[in-house]
Image (cartoon, rainbow, N blue to C red):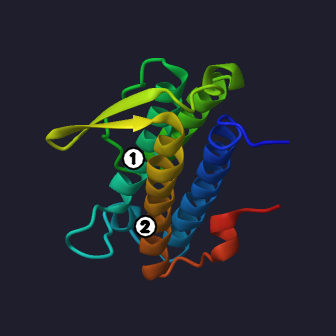
């Protein structure tokens, strides 16, 4: 059996967003247990020239909702990027999962050759569906989830590799 575009995208996105949600739950519990203002984690960065945790989550969710919509040939949902709490970030993740669940395999499969055009900074970049998913979206998605994990781990949240990977 061959792997199709839907299998390589939507279930992967939903699983990793679930793992991200669990990591954020653990971060909030850690903040409460240690009497740390949760905003410290929300605004934390690994280095001054990196985005804070809140933006990492925003970009991860933007990456997958945009991918699903573009591959399905439907409008990309627009979010405000105004999350300032763990509850806000969890709501964003939940909203993204709900959107992803609304996209069917019939809408995604067959998009391997679909042209995808993105405006990146000040230029337009054209992709073909399969390389867009495999070479652009997935690496970016994992990068921003990993950055979120690293920010929290660096700040003492007791999470490990299995939190990142999730249960099997």
Q: Disc 1, disc 2: CB below 8 Å?
A: no
Position of the C terminus by quadrant: bottom right
Residue 98 x, y percent position in the rendering? 61, 30
Q: Residues within 10 Å of mark 2 (few under 14, many from 20)?
A: some
Where is 35 relative to 98, above or below?
Answer: below
Q: Sequence order check: which comes first, mark 1 or mark 2?
A: 1
Point 64% across, 38% down: residue: 10
Tally of numbered tags:
2
Toward the left, the furthest residue is 122
The quadrant holding residue 165 is bottom right
Question: Quick one: 27 or 93, which is closer to the camera?
Answer: 93
Question: Quick one: 142 or 132, which is closer to the camera?
Answer: 132
Whether residue 79 is visible to the viewer of this picture, yes or no, is: no
Q: Which residue is mark 2?
A: 147
Q: Is 46 on the left or on the right of 144, as rendered? A: left
Q: Residues within 10 Å of mark 1 (few under 14, many from 20)?
A: some
Where is 117 relative to 120, above or below?
Answer: above
Whether residue 78 is visible to the viewer of this picture, yes or no, is: yes
Query: Real-space Cα distance between discs 1 and 2?
Result: 12 Å
Point 48% across, 39% down: residue: 92
The quadrant holding residue 42 is bottom left
Q: Is 16 on the left or on the right of 91, as rendered? A: right
Element under disc 1: helix
Q: Which residue is mark 1?
A: 58
Question: Quick one: 134 or 156, which is closer to the camera?
Answer: 134
Residue 51 x, y percent position in the rendering? 28, 61
Residue 8 x, y percent position in the rendering? 66, 44
Element under disc 2: helix
Where is 1 relative to 145, above or below?
Answer: above
Point 39% across, 47% down: residue: 58
Position of the N terminus by quadrant: top right
Q: Is 123 on the left or on the right of 29, as rendered? A: left
């Amino acid at each position: 059996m061959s792997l199709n575009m839907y299998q390589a995208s939507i279930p992967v996105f939903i699983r990793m967003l679930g793992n991200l949600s669990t990591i954020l739950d653990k971060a909030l519990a850690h903040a409460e247990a240690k009497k740390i203002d949760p905003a410290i984690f929300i605004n934390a960065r690994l280095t001054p020239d990196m985005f804070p945790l809140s933006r990492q989550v925003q970009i991860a969710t933007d990456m997958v909702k945009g991918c699903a919509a573009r591959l399905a040939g439907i409008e990309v949902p627009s979010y405000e990027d105004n999350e300032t709490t763990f509850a806000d970030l969890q709501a964003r993740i939940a909203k993204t999962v709900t959107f992803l669940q609304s996209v069917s395999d019939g809408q995604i499969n067959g998009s391997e050759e679909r042209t995808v055009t993105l405006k990146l900074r000040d230029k337009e970049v054209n992709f073909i569906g399969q390389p867009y998913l495999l070479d652009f979206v997935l690496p970016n998605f994992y990068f921003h989830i990993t950055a979120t994990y690293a920010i929290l781990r660096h700040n003492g949240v007791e999470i490990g590799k299995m939190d990142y990977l999730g249960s099997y």
